[in-house]
Image: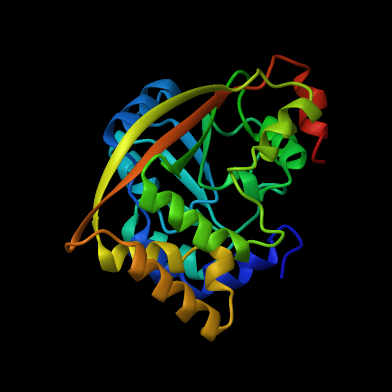
C-alpha cells in the first residue's frame, strides 16, 4: 500500500467502489457551471483532477472539451472512471507525487478528496505542474445537518471514524497556512437537494471509507441503523451544500518551483 493512501481509503474504497458509484451524489449543475467558468475549461486546455474516484466530477466536465488528466490511486475506482469517462486520461498516482511535467496543467481540481492528502506536499507538487497563476478548485458535497434525519445519520456513523481524515474537521485548510505561495482560498456554497432512493442512500453510507472497511457484522449494524433513519417513501431528498474553495499559486521563480519536486 502506498504510504500516501490512508488505510481506510485503501481498504474501504477498494471494497466499495461500486457502491460509491451508485450512492454518491452528483455535483449540482450551478456548481459545475461556476467551476467551468472559473477554471476556464474549454477545448485544448489541460485540467488535472486529483482523487478522481469513479469519475463523478469527470463526467460533467468532459463536455467542455478540456483535456482531463484524472489521477486516482485506487485501482477499483479507476476501473469505473475509465468506463464512465472514456475521454479522460485516467492514471494511477498520488497528489503528493504528480507524474506530470512542470508547468503542463492549465487548472486543477479535487472533489471530495483534498482532506485525504498531505496538504503541504500536494500544494508543492501542484505549484510545480500548474502554469503560472493557474487556478485550483477544491469542492465537497457536504451533508446538510439542519435536516434532523441527516444529523442523526452523522451521529450513527461518526463513532466508527477513528483517525480517518474528514472535510468536516477543516484541518485540511491549515495546509494553506503552512505552505507559502498560494492565495487565501475563497469559498462559495451551493445549496443542493439531491433526489435519490433508499437503496442509493444505503450505498452512499456503506461506501464511506471507514464504514466500508469495517468487519461485516459492523457494516450490517450500520445498514440497519440507516434503514431505521430514512424518511418514509421510496424517494429520498438528501440535502447537501456543495462547498467550493478557489485558490491559485502566487507568482514566483519558475526555476525554483520546478526544482521543488526534482
Q: Nearer the viewer, residue 233 or 195?
A: 233
Q: Is residue 171 above or below residue 26?
A: above
| Residue pictured at 43% horizontal, 63% vertical | 205
Res 57 quadrant in image: top left
The quadrant in which the C terminus is found is top right
The quadrant in which the N terminus is found is bottom right
Res 7 quadrant in image: bottom right
Residue 159 placement (x, y as % from top left):
61, 63
| Residue pictured at 63% horizontal, 56% vertical | 93
Q: Nearer the viewer, residue 14 or 24?
A: 24
Q: Is residue 131 above or below residue 15?
A: above
Q: Is residue 179 visible?
A: no
| Residue pictured at 74% horizontal, 46% vertical | 118
Number of callouts in the render? Answer: 0
Left or right relative to 208: residue 31? left
Q: Nearer the viewer, residue 152 or 250?
A: 152
Left or right relative to 10: residue 240? left
Residue 18 placement (x, y as % from top left):
39, 70
Residue 244 placement (x, y as % from top left):
48, 30
Q: Is residue 158 visible?
A: yes
Left or right relative to 66: residue 164? right
Residue 27 placement (x, y as % from top left):
34, 42
Residue extending farthest bottom: 217
| Residue pictured at 72% horizontal, 65% vertical | 2
Amino acid at each position: 500500500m502506498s504510504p500516501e493512501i490512508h488505510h481506510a481509503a485503501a481498504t474501504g474504497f477498494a471494497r466499495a467502489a461500486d457502491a460509491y458509484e451508485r450512492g454518491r451524489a452528483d455535483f449540482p449543475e450551478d456548481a459545475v457551471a461556476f467551476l467551468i467558468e472559473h477554471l476556464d475549461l474549454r477545448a485544448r486546455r489541460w485540467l488535472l483532477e486529483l482523487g478522481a474516484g469513479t469519475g463523478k466530477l469527470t463526467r460533467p466536465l468532459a463536455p467542455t472539451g478540456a483535456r482531463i488528466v484524472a489521477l486516482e490511486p485506487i485501482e477499483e475506482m479507476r476501473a469505473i472512471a475509465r468506463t464512465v469517462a472514456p475521454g479522460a486520461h485516467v492514471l494511477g498516482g498520488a497528489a503528493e507525487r504528480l507524474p506530470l511535467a512542470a508547468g503542463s496543467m492549465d487548472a486543477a481540481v479535487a472533489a471530495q478528496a483534498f482532506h485525504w492528502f498531505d496538504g503541504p506536499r500536494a500544494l508543492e507538487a501542484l505549484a510545480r505542474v500548474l502554469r503560472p497563476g493557474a487556478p485550483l478548485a477544491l469542492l465537497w458535497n457536504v451533508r446538510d445537518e439542519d435536516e434532523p434525519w441527516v444529523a442523526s445519520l452523522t451521529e450513527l456513523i461518526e463513532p466508527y471514524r477513528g483517525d480517518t481524515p474528514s472535510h468536516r474537521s477543516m484541518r485540511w485548510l491549515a495546509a494553506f497556512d503552512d505552505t507559502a505561495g498560494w492565495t487565501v482560498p475563497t469559498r462559495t456554497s451551493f445549496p443542493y437537494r439531491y433526489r435519490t432512493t433508499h437503496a442509493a442512500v444505503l450505498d452512499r453510507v456503506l461506501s464511506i471509507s471507514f464504514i466500508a472497511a469495517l468487519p461485516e457484522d459492523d457494516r450490517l449494524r450500520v445498514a440497519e441503523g440507516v434503514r431505521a433513519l430514512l424518511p418514509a417513501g421510496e424517494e429520498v431528498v438528501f440535502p447537501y451544500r456543495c462547498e467550493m474553495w478557489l485558490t491559485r499559486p502566487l507568482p514566483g521563480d519558475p526555476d525554483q518551483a520546478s526544482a521543488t519536486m526534482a
